[in-house]
Amino acid sequence: MTVSVLIVDDSGFFRKRLHEILSSVSEIKVVGAASNGKEALELAKKLHPDVITMDYEMPIMDGVTAVRHIMSECPTPILMFSSLTYEGARVTLDALDAGAVDFLPKNFEDIARDYGKMQEVLKGRILAIAKNTNTGKVSAPINKTEPVDKAITASQPLKETRERNNTFGRTTSQSSSTTASLNRSAKVNKPSGSVSNYKSPAVKKINHPVDILLIGASTGGPVAIQKVLEKLPANFPMPILIVQHMPATFTPAFSERLNSLCAVKVKHAEDGDVLQPGLALIAPGAKQLIIVGSRPQIKIVDGDERLSYKPSVDITFGSAAKAFPGKVLAVVLTGMGADGREGCRMLKQSGSTVYTQSQKTCVIYGMPMAVDKAGYSDASIDLELMGEQILNGVS
């Protein structure tokens, strides 16, 4: 199967280089190019590409606005190109929030210098996105809700009566700034009652003590993690560690974003941080986060250069299995690859609990699938219900 791609960038040089690189891949066909978001929207509706590559800074209509319109009018998997700066990270997170699937650093020098490397990276990412993404290419509007009769899959499926949002689960007509403002208001006004107030009788309690919550994710993870954390109250009774595959320049902006939107406190992890209830620590990009000491605290290390992921879910989950044997709740969310499977094996061997995000609500069902197929998941849960399941499981 040939994957059709629409290239969107205001730089003629970048469009040409991307076209050359992608056109040399037999499985990919470039069907068009646009120099701004307005053209991108028009061509997306006309050409119906399988994947769109999108710049964020363009005239007439910027990339984030274009993503929002495309996901509303003709949902298509979108791969963002971003600069490795704080501002680039902030805008990219806005684009992911608007519905983009994934991102790659936009580095003109690398593209000009290492053709072969960029070809392999782009080929792998675009083919994976086209093959595995729950794109929302449906006739119904993206903000339509529909009932789901099997939200949690386990040995004894749990009945649920909620409705979930279609595909990316968001109303794209609302701007990111408006959404952030509303969520910040919710954070300020959210009641500070105990966790037990959130308990649903439909969800079973975990049958062992839980001293820490772990979350691992990759592609699609920033939005998924936000949705989970937004369900947790400020008085959440245990520390939270989050491992999201992300460049070093992105994780500080990601931490700040989550802290502004969620009731729990979110912090970019630093060496020596002490684990605290209600505090979520984000693993730094390009480093490894492990738990050490009799009074468990965070250690940030460079890690083995042979490891594919920095940060790695396996590394953090494995250290938690040793520090908190039989007392961990681990959650594996959407993502490409199998990072987390070995960490979950260690957690299960020590008697802990693992939840995975359901296939139908994943952007890419890679990491959860690896854990599911290995038999390490205690329950496969729709993203919209994950926060509630966590609360009821540990309360």
Image: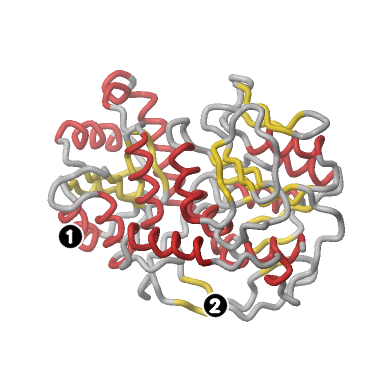
- What residue sits 66% from the left and 67% below the top? 193
Near mark 2 (Cα within 10 A), the count class, few <14, some 14-19 or many ≥20, is: some
- In the picture, the disc for residue 42 is 1
Q: Answer whether labels 2 and 1 touch (C-beta < 8 Å).
A: no
In the displayed structure image, the side of residue 299 where residue 334 appears, left or right: left
Q: Position of residue 116 (x, y in %)?
A: 36, 24
Q: Position of residue 309 (x, y in %)?
A: 57, 31
- Secondary structure of residue under mark 2: strand
User: In this view of the protein, which residue sits in the foreground, 202 or 291?
Assistant: 291
Q: Position of residue 70 (x, y in %)?
A: 28, 60
- What residue sits 78% from the left and 42% below the top? 345
- Secondary structure of residue under mark 1: helix
In the displayed structure image, the side of residue 279 where residue 361 appears, left or right: left
Q: Is residue 364 above or below residue 172?
A: above
- What residue sits 81% from the left and 47% below the top? 348
Q: Is residue 26 above or below residue 115?
A: below
Mark 2 or 1 closer to N-term?
1
Q: Which residue is mark 2?
A: 163
Picture quarter with the C terminus: bottom right
Q: Is residue 249 above or below residue 170?
A: above
User: In this view of the protein, which residue sits in the foreground, 224 or 292?
Assistant: 292
Amino acid carrying label 1: it is Glu
Amino acid carrying label 2: it is Glu
**Residues at marks 2 and 1, CA–CA distance in whole angstroms:** 32 Å
Colour approach in the figure? secondary structure
- What residue sits 40% from the left and 55% below the top? 97
- In the picture, the disc for residue 318 is none
